[in-house]
Amino acid sequence: MADIKFLITREIGVLGEGGKGWQKEINLVSWNDRKAKLDIRDWGPDHERMGKGVTLNKDEAIKLKQLLADIDLDSLDIG
């Protein structure tokens, strides 16, 4: 399997921390020398390893922001 190239072009923030120092982060990431996208995923210490995640282009990020702004998170039955 070919190696996946990535470059974190901007660290936006940490959403939470799991076991063994892994953190769920939001970053701008360039994958395989392409234009950076908004990326949400778990990262190991020093960004050497990563878990599965979600990448969003600008239009998708705008839509996600609108959807989250339109809901009352306190009314949702989520853990």
Image: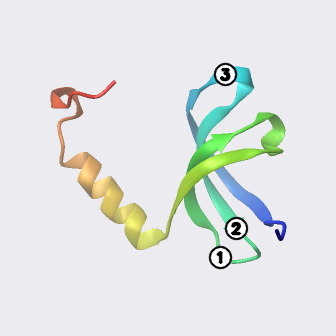
Frontmost of labels 3 and 2 is 3
What label does residue 30 carry, if any? Answer: 2
- Secondary element under disc 2, as helix, strand or loop, is strand
Type of the residue with mark 1: Lys
Earlier-in-chain disc, 3 versus 2:
3
Question: Residue lying furthest front in this view?
Answer: 1
Quadrant position of residue 72:
top left
- Residue named by callout 3: 19
Q: Which of these two is toward me, 60 or 52?
A: 52
Q: How many marks?
A: 3
Type of the residue with mark 2: Ser
Residue 3: give x, y in percent of width and height. 84, 66
Residue 22: give x, y in percent of width and height. 69, 31
Q: CA distance from mark 3 to mark 1?
A: 31 Å
Judge whether 77 appears above or below 61 on screen. above
Quadrant position of residue 4:
bottom right
Judge whether 21 appears above or below 69 on screen. above
Q: Residue at x 25, y 54 (%)?
A: 67
Q: CA distance from mark 2 to mark 1?
A: 6 Å
- Residue named by callout 1: 35
Q: CA distance from mark 3 to mark 2?
A: 26 Å
Type of the residue with mark 3: Gly
- Secondary element under disc 1, as helix, strand or loop, is loop
Q: Residue at x 57, y 56 (%)?
A: 39
